[in-house]
Amino acid sequence: MTAAGTTAPTTTPMTRREFLYYVWGASMALFMAEFGGAILWFALPRFRAGEFGGKFTLPVSEIPAVDAEPKDFPAGRFWLINLGPQRAADSRQPADYPVKEGVAAVYKVCVHLGCLYKWVTVNDRFECPCHGSKYLASGARTDGPATRNLDVFIMRALDANGNELAKTKAGDPTSDPEAGAPFALPEGTAFIEIDTGKRIQGGLNTKPGGGK
């Protein structure tokens, strides 16, 4: 009895089972918080310049000569192409995909099932060793199970002060031939910037000879 004549409330000791439940619940809450944090850590992009998924800034001296073989940049997973009149006149180029002269950065993964294709000098074209898809230097599919042209990355032409002079047009190449197309470097271009975090899918190209 208390001084006021009332009965003091009693407390029931925590059982061992209840204690273990509390410990288990706290452990699960901590685990879920850590797990969620890990998911966010891996899901959110943390790309830096000079690594795949980031931006590559190259001097114009790194661009291959007009109509030369594509130049491989393994760190960025792209080929630099510089299409000129010789490539534009290539009889193998599908009529549905006429070549636009200029520079572009082509993603070096085959659009069929993701294999790394290679440039075969003797055949003057890209060839996928996995399933036989073939592409011209322009990125146009000419044979194999692939159903579209090669993907390209967004590229910008910059002057010596980093000002943008030209940029790859975004969009769907299937409906807009200008989307993802190479472009001529404007006068005063000192650098090109390839953003490997921004990719444009190649236009549909499902029949031999480039027909849709």
Image (spheres, grey):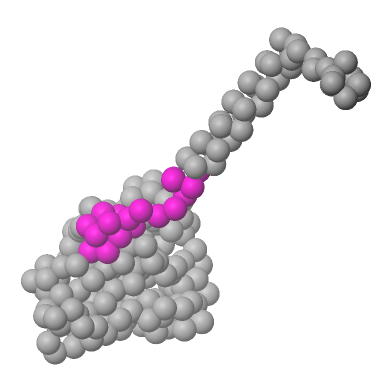
Residue 179 screen position, x and y as percent: 41, 80
- Closest to the observer, 53 or 129: 53
Residue at the image point whose x is 11% and y is 71% from the top: 59
Q: Which residues are magenta?
A: 39-56
Q: Position of residue 89 (x, y in %)?
A: 25, 82
Q: Is residue 152 magenta?
A: no
Q: Is residue 145 above or below residue 82?
A: above
Q: Nearer the viewer, residue 180 or 54?
A: 54
Residue at position x 46%, y 73% in the image? 203
Q: Is residue 83 visible?
A: no
- Image coordinates of residue 9 in percent, x first then y, are 84, 21
Of all residues shown, which one is farthest toward the top?
Answer: 16
The answer to whether residue 15 is visible is yes
- Residue 210 x %, y %: 44, 73
Q: Residue at x 22, y 79 (%)?
A: 157
Answer with the quarter of the image where residue 93 lies: bottom left
Is residue 195 shown above or below 46? below
Residue 51 lies in the magenta stretch? yes
Query: Which sits in the foreground, 56 or 103?
Result: 56
Indicate whether 181 appears above or below 59. Answer: below
**Residue 153, picture quadrant:** bottom left
Q: Which residue of the protein is positioned furthest toward the bottom in this rendering?
A: 187
User: Is 207 on the left or on the right of 2, as rendered?
Assistant: left
In the image, taking residue 62 as reference, residue 35 lies left or right, namely: right
The residue depicted at 50 percent of the width and 71 percent of the height is 204
Q: Main secondary structure of the magenta part?
A: loop
Q: Quadrant of the N terminus?
A: top right
Choose between 83 and 154: the one closer to the eye: 154
Residue 188 horizontal side relative to residue 140, left or right: left
